[in-house]
Image: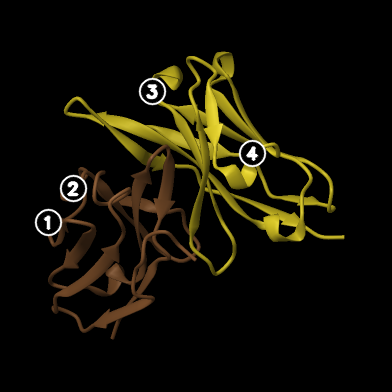
Chain colours: A brown, B yellow
């Protein structure tokens, strides 16, 4: 049972906009920044978003993040086949880093 | 460009210990904390703890306290994670991660190692 709650799956067709949610509590998302990671099967996770809505260099602006209260979301617009993979949210909860259970994104 | 290269796969018997190494290149090794994250096959990410190569300080989640030791050797830019009293449910891919300073902000777990599969089986 993960501390942060994500839907187990999401899907969309190429070109569509998809949103993945991440729900937490006042001790994690409510009081700390949210990070998002993308993991293509068989590879290491890659940082996709930091400090709620900041994209690292090289991450397309099709990806955007937001946070409100104790929830956060990752939006992917103009969905592409290479966006398929697992997405994880993360935040600090006191001195412990907690992750969401992950959302498997399928591009139909 | 920073790279984190981890040691190869390991097969261990229950009750044994394992050491996973993580060698950093391309940047100052002691400037950033190293975090360790593991992933059981088919499951999500689980944070294990962090260590500061500069101070030697470390901390882990309660789940691993008493079984995990995180250290480093700055002279060879390498961090280590030792896990003892291995059980079958410790079978997982173990990742080391490191941060990066972006516009004066330390961004946690920016770089990831390729992962090390540790299999615990009798």
Could you tell me how far apart the alpha carbons at marks 1 and 4 are, in whole angstroms? 40 Å
Q: According to the image, label 2 marks what residue?
A: A55
Numbered disc in front, either 1 or 4: 4
Q: Are marks 3 and 4 on the same chain?
A: yes
Task: Give SS at disc 4.
Answer: loop
Tell me where residue B90 sits by quadrant: bottom right
Q: Earlier in the sequence, mark 3 or mark 4?
A: 3
Res A22 seen here: yes
The residue closer to the viewer here, B5 or B73, is B73
Q: Which chain is home to disc 2?
A: A
Residue plotted at (59% across, 61% down): B40
Circle 4 crowding by C-alpha within 10 Å: few under 14, some 14–19, many from 20: few
Left or right? Give the position of B58 relative to A81: right
Left or right? Give the position of B98 relative to B91: left
Q: Which chain is home to disc 3?
A: B
The residue closer to the viewer here, B64 or A15, is B64
Could you tell me how far apart the alpha carbons at marks 3 and 2 are, in whole angstroms? 21 Å
Q: Is residue A99 above or below residue B28?
A: below
The tag on residue B27 is 3
Task: Give SS at disc 1.
Answer: loop
Left or right? Give the position of B83 relative to A62: right
Task: Give SS at disc 3.
Answer: loop
């Amino acid at each position: 049972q993960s501390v942060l709650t994500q839907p187990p799956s999401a899907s969309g067709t190429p070109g569509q906009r998809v949103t993945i949610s991440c729900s937490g509590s006042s001790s994690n998302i409510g009081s700390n920044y949210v990070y998002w990671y993308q993991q293509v099967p068989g590879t290491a996770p890659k940082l996709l978003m930091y400090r709620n809505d900041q994209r690292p260099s090289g991450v397309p602006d099709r990806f955007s993040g937001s946070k409100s209260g104790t929830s956060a979301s990752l939006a992917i617009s103009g969905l592409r086949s290479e966006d398929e993979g697992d997405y994880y949210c993360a935040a600090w909860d006191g001195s412990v880093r907690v992750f969401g259970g992950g959302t498997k994104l399928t591009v139909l | 460009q920073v790279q984190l290269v981890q040691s190869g796969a390991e097969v261990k018997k229950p009750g044994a210990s394992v050491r996973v190494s993580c060698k950093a290149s391309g940047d100052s090794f002691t400037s950033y904390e190293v975090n360790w994250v593991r992933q059981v096959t088919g499951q999500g990410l689980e944070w294990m703890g962090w260590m500061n190569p500069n101070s030697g300080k470390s901390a882990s989640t309660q789940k691993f306290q008493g079984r995990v030791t995180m250290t480093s050797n700055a002279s060879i830019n390498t961090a280590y994670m030792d896990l003892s009293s291995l059980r079958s449910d410790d079978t997982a891919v173990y990742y080391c991660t490191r941060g990066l300073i972006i516009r004066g902000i330390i961004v946690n777990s920016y770089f990831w190692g390729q992962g090390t599969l540790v299999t615990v089986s009798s």
